[in-house]
Amino acid sequence: MKNIIAIYARLSREDENKSFIEMESRSIENQIKILSEYAKNNEFDVYRVYYDDGYSGATFDRPQFQELLKDMKKQKFNTVLVKDISRLGRSLHKVGELIEKTFLENNIRLISVSDRYDSSKNSNDDSIVLRNFLNDYYLKDFRKKCKNARLHYAQTKHLNYYPKFGYNFDKDGNEMIDEYSANIVREIFDLIGNKKLSTCKVAEILNNENRPTRSYYATQILGLKPLQRRPATKWNAEKVWEIAKDYEYCGHSLNWIRHKEEEKIILKNTHLAIIDEELYQTTQEIINHRSKQRLDHIGKLIIDRESERNLLYSKNKSDEQEYYLRDLNTNRRIYSIKAKPLEDVIYQDVINTIKCCQKDKDKMYSIYKAKLFSGKEFSPTKIKTKLQQLNIEYSKLLESYFNKTITEEKFNDCSGQMLLKIKEQEVLLNSEMDIKSKLSLFDIRFGKFIESLKKLPVDKFQLIRLAVKKVYMNTIPTKTNIDITIVYKFEE
């Protein structure tokens, strides 16, 4: 019997915050991607993708899950595909009843990819539900023990497994001050705290003095293993800012900062200080004062199309104007654009898009679907029918050749053309399956966007960040010519 499958994915907010979940399984999109690829590799026909985002597995009253059960009773599909059994739910009794009674009564085959379970092959495996829940229990218990161990160490010792810039380890593994890099740290605090220079200006000075960056010094001078693929060769404002904000240079440890929502554990006087408390506090006051001048900007969203790099936010002291600018590692400016007009253009486009979605979401869905997929429609059935006909014709051609009703020359000529057509249809079918997978992901992202419209932020910048993924900007030939492309979150 032909396998027509229903893909089901679920993610609760609790699942989303678990650090031990693999990145590939953490989002609804990635679950669907994994399952779609599995279906494609096994030549399954996907009837529909069902997903419940933000619903706990403790309840079975989930909208899409209930839709799946209704379609199941209408015999729209004969196979359910999930990442693991726990996606169906987290109630041992109810999931067991679902697998052993409901699915069985409706002749539904269940495949769980991560559990390597297939009800058509493991029909006598009654322990799958219990094993799945035991695995979940042990994972939670293991995570709890790891957290307690980390908390104990964080409350008792200075945790630094890789020497911070300004420090190094001696032969016994004890942390000591590295005078050369420590002098660069002192210079940074002096330039900001005492001379009141901006982080951009400090980065420019360090580059002019040929001061090695943190990653370059660690790998090329100290011979340590790199923490990133390519050590940075130039300083920038962000790297300077990270050093200037680091309280550990005062000789104190800030532990347990793995998650933003958790409080930092401060252990006083755990190692030698490079700078004193007074200079640190003065530096923080200057940095915070500069930051308050403009906390809200969208520089991280704006990308120069030519270099694929973010534009930098900057405020010109002479005319008090705010700009987004593109520069090189040497901080040599290439071009700049006034911030407010650009932000207003993007904000207005966001407002117009939201209004159109609220007025007619189906029309907007069709517009962006046509834009992303060039008006292509998913039609694998026609391609499969044609492919089947070609295979039948090729079988007849082979039969004629073996029966010697056609010559070898004619067979070679016809078979070559036919195999080429078969290959073309196979490539086309794979392309169609890719389109369907991408369409499913687009449906999810667009659905999330529509859902977010129910509670819109009032703040202009929050609204832009809610809707916009990227803003590409072309090189500006003149100051009056701005060419931008806004990419919304549901587009990619």
Image (spheres, rainbow, N blue to C red):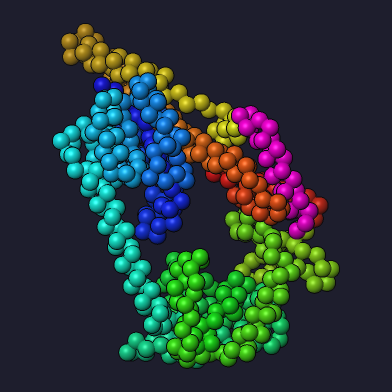
Q: Residue at x 57, y 28 (%)?
A: 375
* Vertical placement of residue 342 versus 211, above or below: above
- x, y (%) of residue 359? 68, 32
Q: Quadrant of the C terminus?
A: top right
Name the residue nearer the viewer: 312 or 97: 97
Q: Quadrant of residue 292?
A: bottom right
In the rendered image, the quadrant that contains the N terminus is: top left
Horizontally, residue 279 falls left or right of residue 72, namely right
Nearer to us in this view, 356 or 373: 356
Residue 175 shows in the view: yes
* Quadrant of the image occupied by residue 202: bottom right
In the image, residue 234 lies in the stretch drawn in magenta: no
Quadrant position of residue 430: top left
Q: Residue at x 30, y 39 (%)?
A: 95
Residue 465 vertical placement versus 81 (above, below): below
Q: Please give the name of the residue rendered at 62% of the width and 50% of the height, measured from the top-left corner.
A: 466
In this rendered view, identify the residue nearer to me: 146 or 484. 146
Describe residue 16's horizontal placement relative to residue 139 as left or right.
right
Q: Which stretch is magenta?
A: 339-364
Residue lying at the far top in this picture: please name it.
Answer: 405
Q: Is residue 414 left or right of residue 293?
A: left
Task: Mark yes or no: residue 371 visible.
Answer: no
Task: Give the percent coordinates (x, y) of residue 124.
Answer: 15, 35
Which residue is situated farthest in the right direction here?
319
Residue 347 among magenta residues: yes
Q: Main secondary structure of the magenta part?
A: helix
Q: Is residue 142 left or right of residue 265?
A: left
